[in-house]
Image (cartoon, helix red, strand yellow):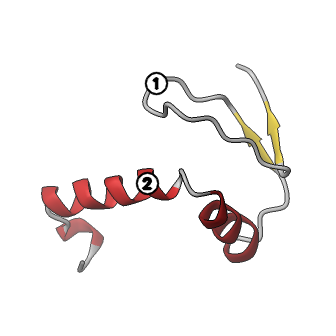
Amino acid sequence: MGRFDSVTDEQARELDRRIFENYKDQRWLYHVVTERANIELMFKRPLLGRYAFTTSYPWEVLVST
């Protein structure tokens, strides 16, 4: 993939698919969030819709709107 503004529709669909699949893997999430991004605390609003799976993390605090 080149520059962000030159992403094709097909590349965007593939990237979306890969991100969606990665979110199902707890190991990937822990690696990305805690090791790569170094996140210690996150405020999270529960999602509605697309994701048919639920996740919970030791670094999250659920908030409502």
Q: Is residue 53 left or right of residue 60?
A: left
From the image, tell me which residue sits under label 1: 49
Q: Quick one: SS at disc 1?
A: loop
- How busy is the neighbourhood of tag 2: few (under 14 within 10 Å), some, or many (20 plus)? few
Dot 2: element: helix
- Decide which of 11, 55 is in the foreground and name it: 55
Return the mark for residue 21: 2
Q: Disc 1 marks which amino acid?
A: Gly
Pair 2/1: label in front: 2
Q: Residue at x 23, y 53 (%)?
A: 13
Left or right: residue 13 compared with residue 59: left
Say which quadrant the C terminus sits in.
top right
Residue type for callout 2: Glu
Instruction: Give the label on residue 63, or none.
Output: none
Classify residue 53 by image quadrant: top right
Single out the residue that lies furthest toward the top: 65
| Percent x, y of residue 54 | 63, 35
Q: Where residue 1 sits in the image (x, y, percent)?
A: 24, 78
Q: Nearer the viewer, residue 31 or 45?
A: 31
